[in-house]
Image (cartoon, rainbow, N blue to C red):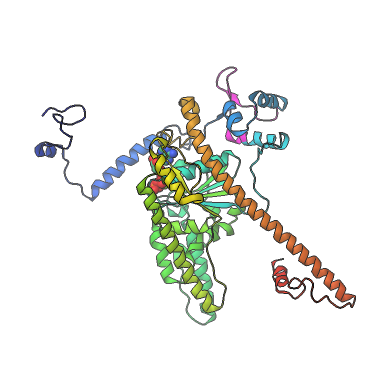
Amino acid sequence: MARDGTGATGGLPPYFNIDPDAALADLDPPTDTAGFAAIAGACARGRADLAGRGLDETGRKQLRLFSTWEITRYLIPVASAHFRRVLKQNPDLPQGRSETEGGAKWFTLDEVLRLRAFFGAQGSKAKNYLPYRPEGLAAKLVAVANFKGGVGKTSTAAHLAMSAALDGYRVLVIDLDSQGSMTSIFGGRVEDEWQTAFPLLARHYGEHLRAENQRRMDRGETPTPLDEALVAALSMSARDVIQTTHWPNIDLIGAQLNLYWAEFQIPVWRMASRGWKLWDALSDRLAADGVLADYDLVFIDTPPALGYLTINGLAASDILLVPLGASFLEFDSTGRFFDMLHSTFQSIEEGENAAARALGRPGMAFEWDAVRAVVTRYDSAQQGELGALMQAYLGRTLSPHRQDFTALIGQAGEQVSGIYEADYRDFNRETYARGRETFDATYAAFKRLLLGIWRRAERAQEESRAERAQEKASAERAQAEDGAGRPRAGGAGQGRGPGGEGNERAFQDV
Ligand SMILES: Nc1ncnc2c1ncn2[C@@H]1O[C@H](COP(=O)(O)OP(=O)(O)OP(=O)(O)O)[C@@H](O)[C@H]1O
Ligand SMILES: [Mg+2]
């Protein structure tokens, strides 16, 4: 039968007149279990081929260099003549290298960060060359989640991590998805689950069990034995599973297939000890191991499921970003995701608070500094109406910036992941600028949120400090007056004076 170029026969749609015998001739034998291994093997070989391109001689990913054009346009926005002049006047600063005699100068990101520090210290105060992070406040944790697959979670998290790093923040990326896409993007090497977040969760459970055993022994009961894995985990810290990446200021806790094991292990632990607060495991361990002081931002990429790992990531986070495409199915599914978030966290709260009430202890409630849905892969020509509808219904929950679909994402091999790793010379300058603009704007919207949140926390810190100072001063005054044998004022400052409830709390805080 004659076929035209589209595969249709004689002007009929392509699914008409398929000859069963011809179809049979095309067919392979049935697939058995071993067939999956063969397919996986083919994928692994192809992946290795792709991954091998553009690696350095040690087989690790390498970050490209940054040109004077890019630096003065995107990273240290000054006139390029001024930039060159400052470099010339300061021979100790990185001078860059050029590929051709007199050609453009290129710098490593480390060098760019040093230059930025210099401009931050010497340059115009009107531009914030150095990114804002209030002193004394912990890193902010950002989870990117949606149980719908392929909505842009990993791309969004990776791009935000990279833009924050280019902006000068110290970033930790945690991959909680056993697919390990984020780990690939950052060139992570993960042999098994012991190099993932798993041991941190295991340690949290191990410590809980140990404390519980102590109480058991105090009551004269037999303790529950800790298995080998838990004992091993007890000596591990976040620093044991954090690896450096080809980005000087991005570190990684990677993932690989075995991390999925946690989804089976966590409920078993919880069954064995109902008092274990599994949702606190990641945040408690990150805090205990000093991660919140070592980094400015922690981005957590989660799998497309609301499993135990995702719950841990969400409970640990201060900011929750929920990417979704402007399509009916993604909007619909995201609505259900929020419904699941509500019922999951509500049932944890109810369970905990019932137990707390029984013991006469205060209850608990989860809280996020901000929750934002983010439109990804947006095509304004096709999706304008749906985008507007989503905006109308979601209001401020939907981030005002829609991240455009760009062909620059996902087409390059493993060595280049996303727009910030791509060399602009490989693209038409305008395509590059447009693609970059949309991710810069995604970051700008995120950064606005972050700075607002940090500022809020900073103000609260300042206020409570001022309040404590005031209370201390008035307590001292009252003491001095007491000492002088004068009677204490009855009416003024009630509730704040010595013995007042607020005061007790304030003194405890100090
Ligand atoms: N702005 C964008 N423009 C074009 N393609 C994009 C954009 N963002 C993401 N993609 C592509 O969409 C696909 C899915 O993205 P991504 O892997 O980030 O989604 P995900 O939600 O993490 O998926 P999963 O649920 O499997 O973890 C990828 O092929 C990615 O390259
Ligand atoms: Mg992903």
Q: Is residue 384 left or right of residue 16?
A: right
- Residue 124 found in image quarter: top right
Is residue 296 at all visible to an observer of this figure?
no
Is residue 375 at all visible to an observer of this figure?
yes
Q: Which residues are magenta?
A: 91-112
- Quarter placement of the C terminus: bottom right
Residue 462 drawn at (x, y percent): 71, 56
Residue 320 drawn at (x, y percent): 50, 53
Q: In this view, which residue lies farthest toward the top?
A: 101
Decide whether residue 104 is among the magenta residues.
yes
241 versus 360 height, above or below: above
316 or 77, nearer to the observer: 77
User: Ligand 1 falls in which quarter?
Assistant: top left
409 or 320, nearer to the observer: 320
379 or 74, nearer to the observer: 379
Q: In this view, which residue lies farthest toward the right?
A: 484
Decide whether residue 391 is among the magenta residues.
no
Q: Residue at x 52, y 32 (%)?
A: 64
The number of numbered badges drawn on the structure is 0
- Residue 1 found in image quarter: top left
